[in-house]
Image (tube, rainbow, N blue to C red):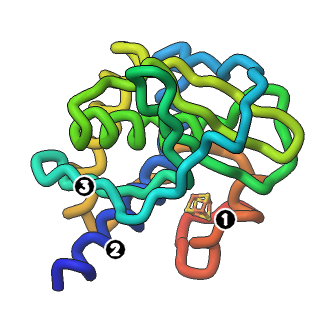
Amino acid sequence: MTLLYLGLTLLLSALVLLFISSRQRRHAGLPGGRVIYTDTRSWGAVEKPLYDANLGLTGKPDYLVRQKEAILPVEVKTSRSPEAAYDSHIFQLAAYCLLVEKTYRKRPPYGIIHYPARDFAVDYTPDLENTLLDVLANIRRDEHRSQVKRSHEDGHRCQHCGYRTVCDQKLD
Ligand code: SF4
């Protein structure tokens, strides 16, 4: 039952983050990340998901990298490398930064999104954290609703969405 709950939390989190990420980014002026070089040899695989009971949040970054005193989450994406990190990927990484801070009592200064052709460092700023906390509050509010309105007019996003077959608000 606990596993089911965790899985459901992840599913809802991913869904709602995708719904509202572009709107939140516009409001928050989120950075798209800065291109960096990373040495993948220092990346360590994460064995267990990180979990914070107070926020009802769980997630497993692909890697953690230790740099001096800092622990940085790394999220690996296999999609085409964009000019700036995608909003939904930034929020996912921010959630990992939050979970790293809760788990290890060390606040990551930034996290890394790894695309096939380039890596982005995304600063884990107080603004990004606050926006993420707003997103999580919205998730908690919306997860008890039978209907959550679509927050975008992006048909391309709907065409590639994994929830398309069950979504009654998809765009053609
Ligand atoms: S199909 Fe479109 S509206 Fe529905 S969840 Fe996916 S992106 Fe959102």
Q: Which mark is residue 128?
A: none
Ligand 1 resides in the quarter of the picture at bottom right
Q: Which mark is residue 161?
A: 1
Pick the residue in front: 108 or 149. 108
Could you say which quadrant of the image residue 34 lies in? top right
Tell me if residue 8 comes above or below residue 158 in the rendering: below
Pick the residue in front: 140 or 146. 140
Name the secondary structure under disc 1: loop
Residue 128 appears at what percent x and percent y? 42, 21
Residue 137 appears at what percent x and percent y? 23, 40
Q: Of circles 3 and 1, which is in front? A: 3
Left or right for 170, reference 106? right
Q: Of circles 2 and 1, which is in front? A: 2
Left or right for 132, reference 4? right
Pick the residue in front: 40 or 127. 40
Disc 1: residue Cβ within 8 A of ligand 1's nearest atom: yes
Which residue is label 3 attached to?
Answer: 51
- Mark 1: which amino acid? Cys
